[in-house]
């Protein structure tokens, strides 16, 4: 069996590492430059990223959590490139969760590559200099005559020594001063920019990859947890005797809510979450505790529970839109004057987007082994989970159960999807409380229904749009009223505007107002928060205006950018209109913009800037008389600076486009009297493979610093598709998901 | 609790389980083979796909008492030291992102190739219609299945 082959290989590597001092650590200094790896390190403690065994095996530790975004492959590629290693000689291992060595080990906001690029280069260059130093000693030549490449240090004469031969001496070399290091010319890169397969592909394809849900520790029992169907309710009693008598059930008990583990409304910001009240069942296997869960009869105290009603929220939002007003985020100088001018043409539209769930393929789960110490100071905890910010669960252990953070060990495992959901650790708080109460090592697994009902949803919302077009076909006024949601008076993440989105960032006569409605349903970060809905509204409405002005959409969009400039010079998070124009032009060129389309077919364009990325997408869509629509092709043009891993980058863009299409076409979470109405995939579906379009990806590798691709290719997808449907049919869609307005993705 | 005799990846095993325990949880919790994944529990997402008697089934809804033939999981798909053509193609095309659904995708595709060694896009879409990929690796899955089909046929000397 192949797994024998694989495990033998793994075993060989492990023994080579620990055997007889053959394995050497290159102890590298903390880089003084800004970046994740330094932010939490307060002194000159050592970091550990690179090991070289005497047989030439190079081990590189990947510091950040992997959820499918490819960071476990990308960051080690940067180190390997700068070292002069052959990628084939590199084995990547996920670094332990240890902020003192590896800094901020978090994955979110698509910024891991940007934040870590300099640190990874320093680690690689430092290792290279130590290897060259060793070669200089052993070969008795000057360092400047030596070059590191292909896992060897090569002298001009042709003599060479392998990294493996040099490792033991290299480890004794002085650690270079980061300020004195030099870096490779990007034109000589052999690894960066190439297509490298994900380092875990073999174990994934053979079923040997370990996700959080696959953890198995000695003596481990299994748990389920059942919260009140109306968020915020507490369990008063349940059919305890009946549940405990079921086969495979060891224990069952009520947990009370615990605010100390984090206030839910603040959950995303601090990575914490309040323990919600509910009933825990502990048993011999997952099926026993799931089966018992389905037989639970709980008396809930719902006095403080959510009564959110999505249908009512829609009505309320329409009323608010009709009345106007709201908090002013931007006040253009002559907006009303432009609307009053009879020479101008005016367009209006009310847009709606729903709450949506993360539905990571791996339901939330966490394994905890709580061990009581002789004194409270000695209580300890070991935690295994897939998390975007695994170190943060230590804080929950301390706040909720008084376990000192120094006594908590966290194992961060590969995540079966994150998308922002695994930035909140409410499920970990439950697992901790269950292990603490039962005194057993416990794996808590959520059912899919738990996973949907207990989500921190992408917030829904509404935008009332109005704009004026001057007689010469130019934008004369823009009026945008955002109607979103707040909890405890504070807009939830992803809800609201800053007043500097497109086109306002480059257009003065704009009014942006915002009204917030209260919500108790938990909201959180969902792939490109805010952007994933704002792009739909703004980029659709710009198309509406281009049509009103009888202008070509691409030309109108480019005109809105104005002159080529960086809105905030040197600020990677600010729009660069030149880069925007370039990606728009490239996308329309590659998509054949302007070509004659058959009856019922159309091309649609959208641009969006977020996460430091400039992205334009063109959708080619056909629609039949019954509103069945097919997305035939998406052409994407993207500027995220130089590409680290071409295969990984294309994969992220393809995935974002499929995710964006699946979401805009099919997905909606609704609340009825507080209860989430969707229980499982039969009521909340994910796009099937048959609907997948052809996806054509083009990168403009500008001289920007490299930035991330986990999110920014998603936001423009929805408006590109609805704009294409308009081009095909003349029908404007202002509501997501499209299934709600009679369109079926086929 | 009853005792069930199963053949998993060529090995004869006996497990104690309630008759209604789905094969998925027998595989994962009793036999500690974690490559087969839990996704929904209602046969909607395909993450739990295994072969019973060579046919792709959703193990999350198949009670252990109803298992009627030898079971193959992702861990048993390779032939000795040789990866299955689909596994090789998955690596070659760098298909996975998070990777969680991929065992189910590969098992569904393997059942397809065992009866149709030259599938069209439409055949692939049909065979994989029951498998979700939340990361959206669909484009590469299609390509990898086509590539695997060429390996598959080459292996059999007819490609």
Image: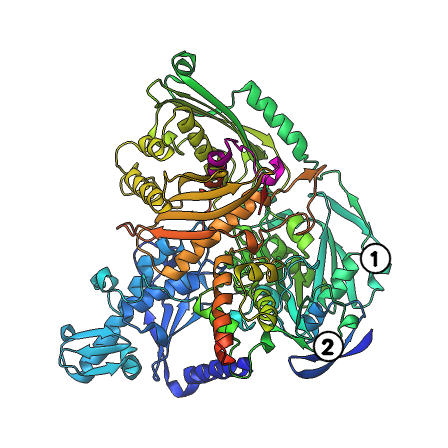
Q: Is residue A442 left or right of residue A129?
A: right
Mark 1 closeness class: few <14, some 14–19, many ≥20 residues within 10 Å: some
Task: Name the disc covering residue A240, or none.
Answer: 1
Q: Is residue A744 left or right of residue A163?
A: right
Q: Position of residue A528 (x, y in %)?
A: 47, 45
Q: Position of residue B60 (x, y in %)?
A: 70, 64
Chain on which label 2 sits: B
Q: Is residue A610 magenta?
A: no
Q: Position of residue A738 (x, y in %)?
A: 58, 39
Q: Is residue A734 magenta?
A: yes
Q: Nearer the viewer, mark 1 or mark 2?
A: 2
Task: Name the disc covering residue A501, or none.
Answer: none
Q: Is residue A104 visible?
A: no
Q: Are marks 1 and 2 in contact (CB under 8 Å)?
A: no
Please determine whether, in this image, residue A318 is positioned above or below residue A199: above
Determine the residue positioned at 35% across, 31% down. A556
Residue at mark 2: B69
- Which one is in front, A571 or A590? A590
State the image quarter where residue A345 is shown: top left
Q: Element type at marker 2?
A: loop
Determine the residue positioned at 76% across, 68% down. B63
Please determine whether, in this image, residue A223 is positioned above or below residue A486: below
- Which one is in front, A341 or A532? A341
Chain on which label 1 sits: A
Q: Quadrant of the N terminus of chain B?
A: bottom right
Task: Report the magenta residues as a range.
Answer: A724-743
Q: Is residue A154 visible?
A: yes
Mark 2 closeness class: few <14, some 14–19, many ≥20 residues within 10 Å: some
Determine the residue positioned at 31% across, 51% down. A641
Please determine whether, in this image, residue A669 is positioned above or below residue A180: above
């Amino acid at each position: 069996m192949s797994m024998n082959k694989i495990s033998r290989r793994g075993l060989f590597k492990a023994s080579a590492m620990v055997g007889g001092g053959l394995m050497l650590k290159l102890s590298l200094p903390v880089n003084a430059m800004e970046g994740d790896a330094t932010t939490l390190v307060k002194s000159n403690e050592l970091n550990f990223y690179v090991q070289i065994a005497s047989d030439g095996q190079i081990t590189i530790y990947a510091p950040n959590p992997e959820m499918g975004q490819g960071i476990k492959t990308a960051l080690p590629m940067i180190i390997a490139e700068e070292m002069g290693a052959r990628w084939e000689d590199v084995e990547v291992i996920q670094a332990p969760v240890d902020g003192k060595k590896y800094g901020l080990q978090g994955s979110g906001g698509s910024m891991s590559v940007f934040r870590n690029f300099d640190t990874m280069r320093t680690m690689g260059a430092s290792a290279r200099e130590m290897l060259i130093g060793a070669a200089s000693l052993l070969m008795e030549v000057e360092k400047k005559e030596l070059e590191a490449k292909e896992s060897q240090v090569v002298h001009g004469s042709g003599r060479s020594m392998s990294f493996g031969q040099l490792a033991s001496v290299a480890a004794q070399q002085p650690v270079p001063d980061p300020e004195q290091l030099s870096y490779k010319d990007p034109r000589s890169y052999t690894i960066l920019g190439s297509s490298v397969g994900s380092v875990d592909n073999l174990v994934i394809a053979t079923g040997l990859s370990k996700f959080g849900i696959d953890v198995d520790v000695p003596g481990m029992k299994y748990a389920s947890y059942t919260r009140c169907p109306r968020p915020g309710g507490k369990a008063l009693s349940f059919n305890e005797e009946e549940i405990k008598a079921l086969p495979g059930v060891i224990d069952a008990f009520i947990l009370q809510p615990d605010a100390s583990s984090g206030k839910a409304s603040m959950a995303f910001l601090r990575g914490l979450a309040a323990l919600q009240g509910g009933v825990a069942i502990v048993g011999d296997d997952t099926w026993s505790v799931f089966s018992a869960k389905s037989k639970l009869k709980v008396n809930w105290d719902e006095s403080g529970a959510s009564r959110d009603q999505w249908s009512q929220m829609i009505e309320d939002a329409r009323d608010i839109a009709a009345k106007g007003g709201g908090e002013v985020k931007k006040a253009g100088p002559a907006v009303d004057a432009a609307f009053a001018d009879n020479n101008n043409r005016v367009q209006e539209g009310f847009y709606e987007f729903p709450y949506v769930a993360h539905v990571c393929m791996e339901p939330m789960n966490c394994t905890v082994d709580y061990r009581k110490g002789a004194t409270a100071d000695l209580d300890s905890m070991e935690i295994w989970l897939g998390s975007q910010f695994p170190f943060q669960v230590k804080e929950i252990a301390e706040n909720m159960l008084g376990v000192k953070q120094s006594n908590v060990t966290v194992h961060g495992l590969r995540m079966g999807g994150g998308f922002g959901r695994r930035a909140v650790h409410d499920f970990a708080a439950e697992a901790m409380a269950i292990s603490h109460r039962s005194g057993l090592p416990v794996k808590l697994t959520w059912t899919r229904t738990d996973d949907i009902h207990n989500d921190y949803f992408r917030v829904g919302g509404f935008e009332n749009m109005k704009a004026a077009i001057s007689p010469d076909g130019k934008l004369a006024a823009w009026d945008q009223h955002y109607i979103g949601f707040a909890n405890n008076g504070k807009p939830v993440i992803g809800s609201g505007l800053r007043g500097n989105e497109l086109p306002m960032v480059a257009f003065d006569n704009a009014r942006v107002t915002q009204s917030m409605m209260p919500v108790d349903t938990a909201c959180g970060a969902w792939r490109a928060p805010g952007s994933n809905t704002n792009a739909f509204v703004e980029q659709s409405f710009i198309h509406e205006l281009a049509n009103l002005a009888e202008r070509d959409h691409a030309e109108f969009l480019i005109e809105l950018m104005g002159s080529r400039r960086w809105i905030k010079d040197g600020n990677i998070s600010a729009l660069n209109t030149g880069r925007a124009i370039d990606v728009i032009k490239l996308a329309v060129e590659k998509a054949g913009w302007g070509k004659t389309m058959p009856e019922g077919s159309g091309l649609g364009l959208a641009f969006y800037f977020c996460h430091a990325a400039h992205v334009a997408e063109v959708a080619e869509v056909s629609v039949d008389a019954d509103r069945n629509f097919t997305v035939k092709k998406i052409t994407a043009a993207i500027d995220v600076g130089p590409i680290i891993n071409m295969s990984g980058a294309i994969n992220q863009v393809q995935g974002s486009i499929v995710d964006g299409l699946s979401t805009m076409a099919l997905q909606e979470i609704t609340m009825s009297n507080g209860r989430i109405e969707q229980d499982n995939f039969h009521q909340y579906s994910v796009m099937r493979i048959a609907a997948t379009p052809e996806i054509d990806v083009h990168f403009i590798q500008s001289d920007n610093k490299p930035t991330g691709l986990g999110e920014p290719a998603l936001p423009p997808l929805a408006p590109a598709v609805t704009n294409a449907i308009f081009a095909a049919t003349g029908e404007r869609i202002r509501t997501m998901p499209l299934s709600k307005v009679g369109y079926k993705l086929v | 609790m009853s005792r069930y005799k199963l053949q998993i990846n060529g090995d004869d095993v006996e497990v104690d389980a309630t008759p209604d325990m789905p094969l998925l949880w027998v595989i994962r919790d009793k036999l500690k083979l974690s490559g087969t994944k839990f996704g929904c529990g209602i046969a909607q997402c395909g993450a739990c796909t295994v072969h019973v008697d060579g046919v792709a089934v959703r193990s999350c809804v198949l009670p252990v008492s109803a298992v009627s033939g030898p079971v193959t999981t992702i861990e048993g798909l390779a032939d000795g030291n040789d990866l299955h053509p689909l596994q090789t193609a998955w690596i070659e095309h760098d298909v996975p992102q998070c990777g969680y659904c991929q065992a189910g995708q590969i098992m569904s595709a393997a059942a397809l190739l065992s009866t149709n060694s030259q599938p069209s896009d439409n055949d692939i879409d049909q065979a994989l219609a029951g498998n979700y990929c939340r990361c959206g690796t669909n484009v590469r899955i299609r390509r990898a299945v086509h590539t695997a089909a060429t390996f598959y046929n080459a292996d059999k000397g007819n490609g």
